Image (cartoon, grey):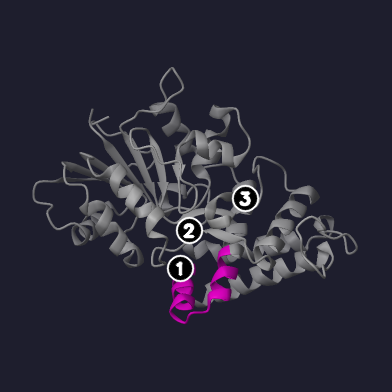
Amino acid sequence: MNKIAYLFGAGASRNALPIVNEIPSRLKSLIDLLNSEKLQLSAEDKFTDIGLKNLESKNVYQKELITDLQWLLDESSKHASVDTFAKKLTIKRERKKLDKLKVALSIFFIFEQTINQPDKRYDSFFASIHNELYDFPENIRILSWNYDYQFELSYLEYSGQSEISNIQTSLNINHKYGDNHQRDKFGIYKLNGTTGLYSDNGWRQYMYATNLNVEIDINFINQIVRNYTAAIYLNNIYSNFSFAWERENPEKSIVEMAIEASKDSVALVVIGYSFPFFNRDIDRKIIGGMKNLKRVYFQAPDAEILIERFKAIKDDVENIELIPKYDLEQFILPNEL
């Protein structure tokens, strides 16, 4: 059975989530939402269950979240992308600001995915590859640079489950902390991690919101602000996504898992991924490990440009067929399936 690898980038979620130049305006909308009178948390009640001393009121922490989102808006407007700003913070070794950026950005994407329906192409993709026994083809491996929940939210109705963590297990999702790795099964490998939290070296996983298929009401705001407070103020809670240039634990490397899972692929399908320079070292490692590649499909409006960038990633392309695909209505299902 031919093994097929998919490589997903931000363009794969284009119909549900904002692209780089749209993030500032969407951040402004979220700030306005959190400032709305009907969604204000209590100025007297406190988050007594998270173990913090000298607690302020819930409303104080809600205002701190708004301040952090405004900071992210201001800074992202000054840079080419949020990634550029994050790289600058890394170079300057401003770890606390980088951690704040990750938390604020994660919460932004949580709200975006609660407000907007998932990109419908994921739904069609699952419907196509699912068999009558409600199982996935064992020869498909998905490598994704996206830390969103589009796979999880699209699979929600298929699984009959509502909690993100349970759906991730069903989909065999692997990320920086949270190893469901099974080499002989369908799997999704999130190279940048996912928009969650962890503690105890990854043994405990947390979500900013356990279920995104809900209305944004005061209870949802309470859950988000509570977990934001824990992420910012507790010393043993960390963001569960990282940028490509950040080092990770070599004993549990998501990159090594992705290489192992995809190394014998005969076809690669690239969907909405632009091969940015920030990711180039890891892209070289993963794609360089695919020694049996015969064909690569590039699905994007600028597919020809992506082919040229791909050639900078992989040297030995003479015997590989490079195929542009400009139809963006559905994710490609290659002939090798």
Q: Between disc 3 and disc 1, whose residue precedes? A: 1
> In this rendering, does residue 204 appear at all?
yes
Report the span colored magenta.
81-102
The quadrant where residue 44 appears? bottom right
Amino acid type indicated by mark 1: Asp
> In this rendering, does residue 330 appear at all?
no
Residue where numbered disc 2 is placed: 19
For the N terminus, which image quadrant?
top left
Residue where numbered disc 1 is placed: 83
Give the residue at x 52% y 56%.
Answer: 18
Give the residue at x 79% y 60%.
Answer: 36
Where residue 262 appears, as percent x and y from the top left, is 28, 43
Element on which disc 3 rests: strand
Q: Specify few, some or many for label 1: CA neighbours under 10 Å numbering under 14, 14-19, or 20 or more.
A: some
Which residue is nearer to you in this view: 80 or 150?
Answer: 150
Q: Is residue 7 magenta?
A: no
Q: Is residue 328 above or below residue 229?
A: above
Residue where numbered disc 3 is placed: 206
Which residue is nearer to you in this view: 335 or 255?
Answer: 255
Q: Is residue 83 magenta?
A: yes
Element on which disc 2 rests: loop
Amino acid type indicated by mark 3: Tyr
Amino acid type indicated by mark 2: Ile
For the C terminus, which image quadrant?
top left
* Residue at mark 3 to residue at mark 1: CA–CA distance: 24 Å
Number of dots carrying numbers: 3
